[in-house]
Amino acid sequence: MEQLTEKLQGILSKSKSIVFFGGAGVSTESGIPDFRSADGLYNQKYDVPPETMLSHEYFFSHTEEFYRFYRDKMLCLDKKPNAAHKKLAKWEAAGRLTAVVTQNIDGLHQAAGSKTVYELHGSVHRNYCRSCHKSYDAEYILNSDGVPRCSCGGLIKPDVVLYGEQLDDYTVTKALEAISACDTLIVAGTSLTVYPAAGFISYFGGQNLVLINRDPTPFDGRADLVIHGKVGEILGSMV
Ligand code: NAD
């Protein structure tokens, strides 16, 4: 492990523009469960699978049940950024990192101070009325009972990309621009099984593709450096 982290430090020290591409594993060290680990949400017992509950179809057909699950499992508003979020924000402020591309919806990169964050799957912190487009914060959703309603009576929907929904065009374009232009891409805390996000790695044309993940991923063979470990611990130890 020490040799691998030394190699990572060597790569980072020489990099002029780093982009970070992350997933749910980036926030597990903040206490937010991921989906596909052994202790992740997909391995807990539910009458309806989480993939179904987090779908576009289910949101509109079972709105109350959707919100029960969403409030309970997806709204982790008391969680704080960990060492990975903080180090990335520090590198951006120092001009070493150009963007964070994330599949996460928890807003912890911004809470740590990151500015250029492309949230491929949206954010729990943005919520809009389906009728009049008035916006609401996550606390409003958490503290409302049943189905959250707008002052106009309209249904409020989180700005989160549910299964069966398309990614936002602008966010995708900016994320791909950043990934194509950087010299080092760090991919971390993602099983790389959710598409189209996982396919974004193919747009990288720089020198160093670094993969940091607790479990092996289908992309391990394509990376210049693979470290199987905890992203917070590893990035936290880098300068
Ligand atoms: P995933 O659950 O499919 O995979 C997470 C991966 O992270 C696993 O391979 C696991 O080995 C690894 N991992 C877990 N903890 C780690 C750590 N501390 N250090 C390094 N690796 C670690 O997650 P995914 O690939 O991001 O796809 C799941 C989808 O679920 C995403 O679209 C995401 O939007 C959503 N999601 C988001 C959150 C969040 O916002 N925090 C939480 C759960 C799920």
Image (cartoon, rainbow, N blue to C red):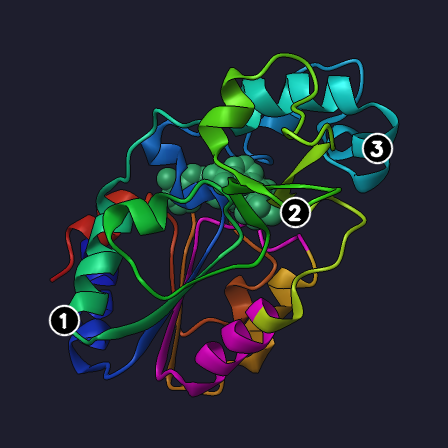
Q: Residue under label 3, please give it.
A: 60
Considering only vertical position in the picture, is 196 above or below 224?
above
Q: Quadrant of residue 15?
A: bottom left
- In whole angstroms, how far apart are the C-alphas of marks 2 and 1? 37 Å
Mark closest to the chain's N terminus, 3 or 1:
3
Label placed on residue 133:
2
Distance from mark 2 CB to nearest ligand 1 atom below 8 Å: no
Question: Does 188 lie within the magenta span?
Answer: yes
* Residue 205 location (% of width, % of height): 48, 87
Mark 3: which amino acid?
Phe
Q: Quadrant of residue 94?
A: bottom left
Residue at left offset 78%, top offset 24%? 63
Mark closest to the chain's N terminus, 2 or 1:
1
- The answer, for residue 231, to whether it is visible in the render is no
- Considering the numbered disc 2 on the image, is that residue within a helix, a strand or a loop? loop
What span is in magenta?
171-194
Q: Residue furthest front?
A: 152
Q: Tell us which disc is closer to us: 3 or 1.
A: 3
